[in-house]
Amino acid sequence: MHSFEYRQAVALDALPVLDAAGLCGHILDAVSSGWRVLALFALPEPGRAATAAGECGGPERRPGAGLCCVLAHDAERRLAAARTAPLAAFPSLAEACPQVQLFEREICEEWGILPEGHPWLKPVRRSPDAPGGAAREFYRVDGGEVHEVAVGPVHAGIIEPGHFRFQCYGENVLHLEIALGYQHRGLERLLRARAGGDPRAALRLAECAAGDSSVAHATALCVLRERLLGLEELDPRTQRLRRVGLELERLANHCGDLGAIAGDTGFLPTSSWNGRIRGDFLNLTAALCGNRFGRGLLLPGGVAWGLSPEECADILARLTAAGRDAAGSAEVMFGAASVGQRMRGTGALSAETACALGLVGVAARACGLERDARFHAPLSELPLAGADAPRTGRSGDVFARALVRRAEMADSLALVADDLGWLAEHPESVAEREAALARTMAASGPLPGRRLAVAQVEGWRGEICHVGVTGPDGEFLALKLVDPSFRNWAGLALAMRGGQISDFPLCNKSFDLSYCGHDL
């Protein structure tokens, strides 16, 4: 493996080219030494022969592709990467290293490269109704009093499509299998086609990866491009405006989640209040950039919007009021004995399980794992107002996930207030505006050839990872997006084991995962 600092771009030719067994061995050794898998994906090599179709392969021909793996060591703030030559199959690591099982299925589905020995080789995003034999069937538990409950993919209201298959004994859930893919849009392929020649159009696509994480995905794509180009760290104004967008996104969604959790415990006061307060945070994002979901805020190399001292003062006053209301709503919720009793012990995950699955974000931190890209892969050297370490829980249940959200909201309020105060005291000068324009123009230029870079951004749901690899002409050979939902849906499935089926809505809200973020 080639090791490098997380902000660096590295030459593709610096990555060792291993055989399949060698790459798998390196992954297992690294994971046992404290590393985790950021991404495992197919890396095409133009001009080489097409790979064998494999068990999951579609009818279309594909260029020859090998594997590329990127690992992260959070404590050391380092990454490592290696690749293989084009291949048709490789030994599966899914049983020994569960965090790669979805990556392996995805590689098989999209490229026809077979992970030999994979225990459950089902489609990740392609239609489950397509022909493909037993590998596409659902896992079933047999027994005299065992029954099956199928939910979705069509749900009531405006919920996105996803299918949940429960194997139950009475009310007790023995196994939950989650089938997604109904929102598959081929986003990575669209981004590869746009990102090289039209970066602003690619940015608009990235904002649609998961609509509630528009700022986080746009930030990741901008940072990836800036690192590939070797741009120096951005100026404090740009960094602070980007952070305001990220933290307002976190505030709105954490506030909405606490309200939804309250609703599923039957506690209507917080459920009702937070619907309105969430709107206040969304309106602050609209005051920042003209869009309630933060779309259009970012540009490669900078931001598209600025704030005057008067606008900073207005947003800060509204932020203070919304923060006070959110804190009061949460205090009432956590002070209700019925709410605490309903959340404690429900949907619990152990730290060992969360680590084995590679969970990130709130779901991981609620189990005690200190995984927060704001700390292990910070985007800048700006001071962090509030907490000096990731907010974590111990019990890994709904109660812990709610507590982490509450604590992170307080930290986000402090961060945004600090940034708004700085921006108000440092209005942009003409020279700074000209330098920012020059930087955005440079960031929109052609990308260097045969480079690899990684962007890690802590979205409100968890770590978003974008990996980009360019070919000889500077166009993307691979642009891999890993949304936190891709990692965390398996955590929800395991959190339901041994619980009651009536716990599912509450558990589901406490994870609050994205269907389209998984499907891409």
Image (cartoon, rainbow, N blue to C red):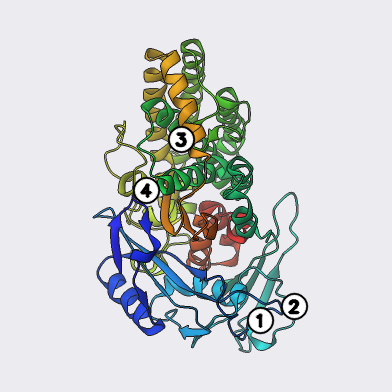
Decide which of tag 1 and tag 4 comes sooner along the chain: 1
Q: Residue at x 43, y 38 (%)?
A: 335
Q: Amino acid at mark 4?
A: Ala
Query: Relative to residue 215, is residue 236 drawn left or right?
Result: left
Residue 38, located in which quarter of the rendered image?
bottom left
> Disc 2 designates what residue?
130
Question: On the rendered image, what quadrant is the C terminus found in?
Answer: bottom right
> Disc 4 designates what residue?
373
Question: On the rendered image, what quadrant is the N terminus found in?
Answer: bottom left
Identify which residue, 162 or 189, lies in the foreground: 189
Q: Secondary structure at mark 3?
A: helix
Q: How crowded is the residue under tag 2: few (<14 C-alpha within 10 Å), some, or many (20+)?
A: few
Decide which of tag 1 and tag 2 comes sooner along the chain: 2
Identify which residue, 210 or 196, lies in the foreground: 196
Q: Whole-Å distance between the Cαs marked 1 and 4? A: 35 Å
Q: Amino acid at mark 3?
A: Glu
Q: How crowded is the residue under tag 1: few (<14 C-alpha within 10 Å), some, or many (20+)?
A: some
Please tell me whether residue 414 is drawn above or below residue 469 in the rendered image. Answer: above
> Disc 3 designates what residue?
247
Residue 186, located in which quarter of the rendered image?
bottom right
Q: Secondary structure at mark 2?
A: loop
Please tell me whether residue 413 is drawn above or below residue 397 in the rendered image. Answer: above
Disc 3 and disc 2 in contact, CB within 8 angstroms: no
> Disc 1 designates what residue?
136
Decide which of tag 3 and tag 1 comes sooner along the chain: 1
